[in-house]
Amino acid sequence: MTGASSGLGTALARHYGAQGAQLGLSGRRLDGLQNAGAGLDARLYPADVRDAAAMQAAATAFLNEVGPPDIVIAAAGISIGTLTEEASDAAVFRAVMDANVLGLVHTFQPFIAPMQTHGGVLCGISSVAGVRGLPGGSAYSASKAAATVYLEALRLELKARRIAVVTVAPGYIDTPMTQVNPYVMPFKMSARVAAAKVANCISRRQAYTVIPWQMAWAARLLKWLPIPVYDAAFEKAPRKPRGLPT
């Protein structure tokens, strides 16, 4: 499980750990991983999902110590405001795309061959922000749209190999990632509630799910809004603060 050092990742670790699962937790912050895995049967692998070699090393260590996993969850990601006109944001765009898209590839690739012997689930956390482009959040929206399409392609590639690919697109979750947002966040979930919903999607091997259900209906509406209507509604929408990924 990536992104386990904070937010949804930590909540997912606690959810599965409470069920007695053997966990492999990866994240950038060792202290966060130690907190997530406290009292659980957890192995900790500090690593950045943008680093393919580090993720390969973590996967190899887990495979050697535990064996092929039943579930791999890619929950790591970066959400931050960006503006194309700002030259300094080019590096931020790259960080967001590397973490939110290539991070999925780096997370899943080492496990696909070992999991073919018994099947299992690869779960990628996308976002409802990938349904339409959000002003001020172009990197994040683009990365999550790309993540959703990547996961769809991967699902079809692996279907005959008994490996299910589950895409979960949450709305707002109360985590450090959203606590800086200077606007109202409808249907916001606690990380604990979101983790339970993600786990339910995994257990059902659902191909694609927006959570919670209220946000699923909002996403359907957003997807089919005509461009002039969408533009008028969102042109002046509040925007996520810019900055450097942390």
Image (cartoon, rainbow, N blue to C red):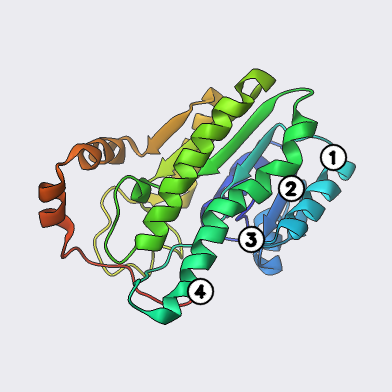
- Looking at the rendered structure, the kind of residue marked 3 is Arg
Q: CA distance from mark 3 to mark 2?
A: 18 Å
C-alpha distance separating marks 4 and 3: 13 Å
- How dense is the environment of label 3, judged by Cα within 10 Å: few (below 14), some, or many (20 and up)? many
**Closer to the N terminus: mark 2 or mark 4?**
2
Say which element carries label 4: helix
- Identify the residue at image location x=68%, y=21%: 161
Q: Crowding at label 2, few (<14), some or many (≥20) Cα neighbours within 10 Å? A: many
- Observer-nearest residue: 94 or 104? 94
Q: Nearer the viewer, residue 40 or 48?
A: 48
Left-right relation of 14 to 215: right
Does 56 sit left or right of 73 as displayed?
right
For residue 136, what is the image quadrant? Answer: bottom left
Give the CA separation, mark 2 to mark 4.
30 Å
* Residue sitting nearer the eye, 228 or 100: 228
- SS type, badge 2: strand
The kind of residue on which mark 1 rests is Val
- Label located before the other in sequence (1 or 3): 3
The residue indicated by pointer 4 is 91
Q: Percent x, y for residue 72?
A: 66, 39
Res 171 visible: no
Is residue 177 something one can see in this rendering?
Answer: yes
Classed neighbour count for the residue bearing mark 1: other residues with Cα under 10 Å, few (<14), some (14–19), many (≥20): few
Residue 100 image point, x, y percent: 52, 55
Q: Earlier in the sequence, mark 1 or mark 4?
A: 1
User: What residue is shown with label 1?
Assistant: 66
* Numbered label attached to residue 50: 3
Tell me which amino acid carries mark 2: Gly
The residue that mark 2 highlights is 24
Q: CA distance from mark 1 to mark 3?
A: 24 Å
Residue at mark 1 to residue at mark 4: CA–CA distance: 37 Å
